[in-house]
Amino acid sequence: MQAAPYMYDYINAEVSQHSPSTVHTKNTELQRFFARYLLQKAMSVFKWDLPETWDRDYFLYVLYGIGYIAVINTDKYGVIPQQCGLDGYNIFYQPKRALVTNPLLKGLRRLDIGTQCTLIKLQPDYGSVMDLVGFYADMMALTAETAGVNLVNSRLSYVFFGKNKNTAESQKKLFDRVASGEPATFVDTALYDVQSGNPSWIPFQQNVGQNYIAGDALADLRKWEMMFDTDVGIPNANTDKKERLISDEVNANNVEVTSKADLWLDQLQKSFAQTSKMFGVKLGVEWRNKPQVSAESEGAEDE
């Protein structure tokens, strides 16, 4: 379900449709690892100028994890950011009130947005980045699992089938001698069928080189990460090309990289301006490493 504002046409469309579930990794610990990694990457896109009395980590995790955070004035703690819920809507279906519940602030506070508090939001629809983080974390975890399973399977090159336990033990000793590097190995004729002259074991061989895809899986893992970087505004090549990139290719990718993050930055700067005007606090946000879009770019190497 969409976060606020809750528009009636969107609600009707949302509850009347059915979409299949996305594919999830079974290794939830691995998914959490990538989710944590990607969330921290997303939070690194901008440089922040926040009051010293604000807890920067609390502010960023609430903002990116929920999508918005209220700024309120308190007698004991001064002007501080607080996680909140949203209540009511105006003529444009924008939320009217922020609901703040913190035990240290003595109960529920229902504050009018714009007069009693401000709301700093990351995106126009009040959404967080957790949908992006969750999707790419799932895909990266699945890809990493594929690489791991393939690495294990690639070690299984031979399986021997013996007629009985004694034959199997003899085969094991034979393989141990070969694997240890002995220049010559001697076996008993009992391991051979006298009539046919064939060995009494049936080897199952696996073409390790043909079935080895861990390298491709690791390359795909990097592709997923580059796609995530593009979505959140982190400069990257986002291409498989090995040769030199021309300036038009670099510019095209840089435009894609900046498109969404520029929208986020506009929302943040607008919210910061409203908060500074209401409470007199100094707030600032800007690109950390904004990709340059220029027709005069000389190209870049794809590492």
Image (spheres, rainbow, N blue to C red):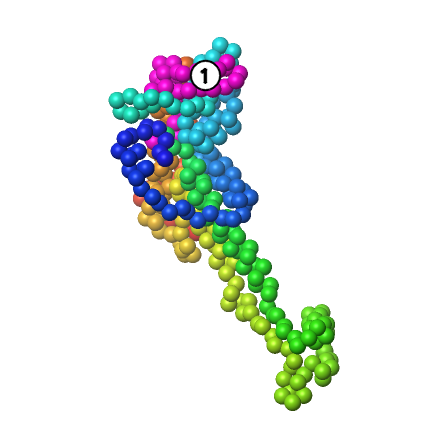
154 up-or-down from 168: above or below = above
4 up-or-down from 134: above or below = above
- Quadrant of the rendering where the N terminus is positioned: top left
Residue 173, how many percent across, how many down?
72, 72
275 up-or-down from 268: above or below = above
User: In the image shown, does 247 or 19 lie closer to the viewer?
Assistant: 19
**Quarter of image, res 65:** top left
**Quarter of image, res 163:** bottom right
Q: Amino acid at mark 1?
A: Leu
- Total marks shown come to 1
Q: Is residue 115 magenta?
A: yes
Horizontal side of 61 relative to 6 (left or right) equals right
Residue under pointer 1: 108
User: Does any portion of residue 261 appear in the rendered image?
Assistant: yes
Q: Residue at x 38, y 14 (%)?
A: 116
Q: Residue at x 61, y 77 (%)?
A: 202
Crowding around mark 1 (Cα neighbors within 10 Å: few <14, some 14 to 19, many 20+) is few
User: In the image shown, does 199 or 78 lie closer to the viewer?
Assistant: 199
